[in-house]
Image (cartoon, rainbow, N blue to C red):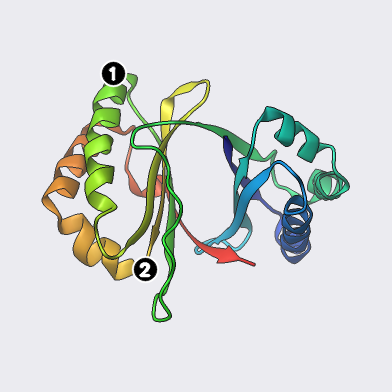
Amino acid sequence: MINLIIKFTVKPKHTEEFKNVLLENKKGAEQEEGFRGMNLFVDNKNPNVFFAYDSWKDEAALESHKNTIHVQNMMKLAETALESAPEILSLGATNPSPVAVKPLNAEDKPFVIFFIFKIKEEYRERLLNRFEIHIKNTRKEPGNLLFDLYTVNGVNDTLVVYEHWRTASDVWEIHMKQPYAKITGALMNEAVIGDLEPYMSFVTEIK
């Protein structure tokens, strides 16, 4: 399985046009044999920033996708619509393995976070070991729908947390007050380069 996170920063005058071409790309990708999933999000604080979370069967499927007309249309628009080149993260596996998102309830107000952070490399193994415990506990929380940690292929100083919650209060009012979350948070404060908050992107799915 190939998993990617792609961040697009769009010039304001092209925002709506680029959102539409992202949705068209997803629609086309869903018909491809090697497609395993694609979720598209807009940043809650900056409507000109989009994220794609892609899953593909293998490298061959991904390469085939890149040659489709819907990707070519997206990349043609990107030449003029984007502020900078897309930021592409090829995600590596960690333990425990990623899982499917739990189903929503009617009363849920989904709260999704991409937490892409730089670390002091000497803390890498300690963080991976700590998150293995953290994730097992977090996934048991009633308010958690998904909590995955990824390494980034070819980059040792970056880790990615991808998380879905039923509501924002499940994070701030419950999760962050758990004993295991406090232990992880203390280690993060030591290990992460700079402040934690700028690395967090709170997003809403677009469909």
Q: Is residue 54 above or below residue 154?
A: below
Q: Residue at x 81, y 45 (%)?
A: 71
Q: Where does the N terminus fall, quadrant-wise?
A: top right
Quarter of the rendering containing residue 19: bottom right
Percent position (x, y) of residue 6? 61, 43
Quarter of the rendering containing residue 102: bottom left
Q: Residue at x 19, y 48 (%)?
A: 181
Percent position (x, y) of residue 32? 77, 47
Disc nearer the start of the sequence (2/1): 1
Q: Where does the C terminus fall, quadrant-wise?
A: bottom right
* Amino acid type shown at disc 1: Glu
Quarter of the rendering containing residue 15: bottom right
Q: Which mark is residue 166?
A: 2
Q: Which mark is residue 122?
A: 1
> Along the horizontal axis of the image, is 68 left or right of 1?
right
Of residues 193 and 5, the one nearer the viewer is 5
> Along the horizontal axis of the image, is 126 left or right of 83?
left
> Along the horizontal axis of the image, is 27 left or right of 199?
right
Percent position (x, y) of residue 160? 43, 39
